[in-house]
Image (spheres, rainbow, N blue to C red):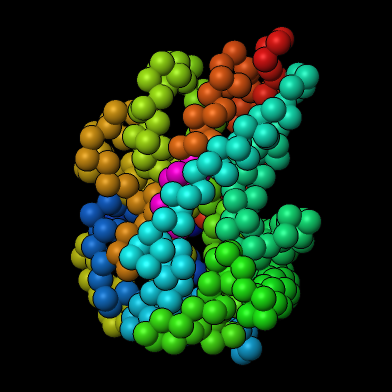
Amino acid sequence: MPPDTLYQRISDYANRADPYPLYAELRENGVVRQEDGSYLVGTYHQIAALLHDPRISSDFLSRADPDDTLLRPDDDLPPAFIGVDDPEHDRLRRLAMRPFGPPHSPGRIDALHGDITRIADELIHAFRGKDRVDLVDEFAYPLPVTVICRLLGVPQEDVPRVRVWTNTIIAALDPADGDDPKRRRHSAMEARTAMAEYLGDLAEERRRRPTADMLSALANDEGPEGRLTQPELKSTAVLLLIAGHETTVNLIANGMLTFLRRPDILEQLRAAPELMPRAVEELLRYEPPVHFLPQRSPLTDIDVAGVTVPKGAPLILMLAAGNRDPVRFADPDRFDPLRENNQHFGFGSGIHNCFGAPLARIEAQIALHAILDQLAGSRLVEDPPPYRRSPVLRGPRHLLIERTAGA
């Protein structure tokens, strides 16, 4: 098939279970212009260079047709820091980082270790007596959403509302969905606004009665640059809440699926649990939770591997394709928990590298270590399992296993 249909084929749900042959086709064709005028990049070194190139913008206004951007912000809610360029990106990210990690809050993530372990153990305890378990609905989803809600200070009883809003927003990232894209964009904006108002009201409560959670810190912190404005706080909180669990759900689910398909790896990790941090890094390369970045564009005409990408053209960086580039990784289609020099794109790279990477790593390491014994002797009910609709945030929607007696 012609290479200018690659994005269409990658987005087709029929290829969700195994997009990797399409990524190999992309690498063979270099930088490829698509029928819709976008440009796909799938080789490791080109992606790495573009992620660090100041001429590449993440601001939707830099697009030649900004109205074509599904998740462009409305007039009342500014974009979060992942959707703007420096110096504004740097200012907003630093303000958000103050209550999250070093140097101002160096112990916040490490302090969650015990809570994450307890949550994982409680979820696994609920498996008792069940012959069949959905590892996504009963483990991979509730663990990170519970963690991020506790971290931010969102009450547990409001988690179902968070899930509805998040699903609506994520649906707008599916370019192959049969619904009208304008309708999906409108629904996503409504959901984002509703979530922002909800989190803004919680922040106002924290201003009146400060607590120990991160939302309270964001609302009350007076750093050298002052506070986030209320609209900035709402946009930041929405980003942290969604990104703080959606990608980790995929990472955990993809990890469990990989281990179930590779009993030898499962037994290796049970015998040597100290390998789990390296196994998680390999998962981030081999089955990353984010497959591509669809919202980039050059600020001027640029040359990428001999192809001129014009100013403002949509530039789609296929991270998962770069993660399996044989020019960069030996035997890239093999899962190797002992892989050396594993500088993957699982958390992106450059100034927009994943803000929550330290938390996601700890959650995945704890969760996958805790679940190892449950996976041993279990079998997949369906392989490949049903996948989520989104080609961007790729992972199983359900992961049904049948468990051995007495497990």
| Quadrant of image for the C terminus | top right
Q: State left or right for residue 285 relative to residue 371.
A: left
The residue sitting at 40% across, 31% down in the picture is 276
Q: State left or right for residue 395 relative to residue 193.
A: left
Residue 14: quadrant of the picture: top right
Q: Is residue 358 magenta?
A: yes
The residue sitting at 57% across, 78% down in the picture is 219
Is the residue 205 above or below the residue 166 in the image?
below
Is the residue 51 above or below the residue 60 in the image?
above
Q: Is residue 34 visible?
A: no
The residue sitting at 32% across, 47% down in the picture is 344
Q: Position of residue 51 (x, y in %)?
A: 30, 64
* Nearest the eye: 270 or 257: 270
Q: Is residue 299 magenta?
A: no
Magenta residues (range)? 356-364
Our reading of the magenta stretch's main secondary structure is helix
Q: Position of residue 384 (x, y in %)?
A: 60, 31
* Nearest the eye: 103 or 177: 103
- State the residue lying farthest toward the bottom: 75
Q: Position of residue 103 (x, y in %)?
A: 33, 65
Is the residue 80 above or below the residue 156 in the image?
below
The residue sitting at 69% across, 27% down in the picture is 125
Q: State left or right for residue 187 relative to residue 218.
A: right
